[in-house]
Image (cartoon, grey):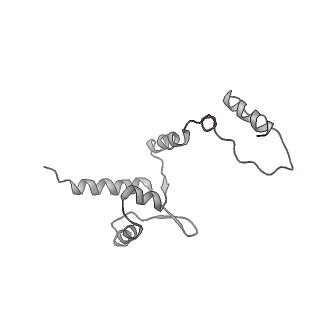
Amino acid sequence: MSNRTLQSITALRAGLAPPVVEDKQAAPRRPVLSEARISGVAAPAAERRAISRQGSLRLVRMPEVKAICGLSRSSIYHLIQEGRFPAPVAIGGRARAWIKHEVEGWVAQRIRASRPHA
């Protein structure tokens, strides 16, 4: 690890801004990881849960949709064609994703439909 990287990590752990060193010939650097990520705490998942609780939208790709609803890819597309499953949104080129709360809402609806009220 370079000396500059160690200084940045030390500064982040101490709550200080990392030292700014301009190197005009160096390639653009990726953003510095958050303090929680450096210390090994699983902050990204905690941040995602906090965002979800605030009502922000989250897009999920096919593997996660399949895991949430328990259906195969072909079953999902068949239900979409029939208008019985949330349609994906275009996220660029041929890429598609689903709005997570719509998929979870579909699952909740299926659970309610399978449990008749006594």
Numbered-mark total: 0
Q: Position of residue 9 (x, y in %)?
A: 71, 34
Residue closer to the observer: 95 or 8 = 8
Q: Tell me the quarter of the image containing the N terminus.
A: top right
Q: Is residue 82 left or right of residue 48?
A: left
| Residue 21 image point, x, y percent | 82, 39
x and y percentages locating residue 50 in the rendered image: 48, 40
Q: Is residue 37 on the magenta stretch? A: no
Which of 63 and 88 lies nearest the eye of the viewer? Answer: 63
Residue 24 painted magenta: yes
- For this rendering, which residue is in front, 93 or 115? 115
- Classified by dominant secondary structure, the portion drawn in magenta counts as loop
Q: 62 left or right of 19? A: left
Say left or right for 112 vs 55: left
At a point 46% along the width and 45% down the height, the residue shown is 52
Please name the residue shown 45% across and 57% down the image: 64
Which residue is at the front of the view, 8 or 52? 8
Residue found at x 62% / y 34%: 39
**Can you see residue 98?**
no
- Magenta-colored span: 19-35
Q: Is residue 13 above or below residue 112?
A: above
Residue 39 appears in view: yes
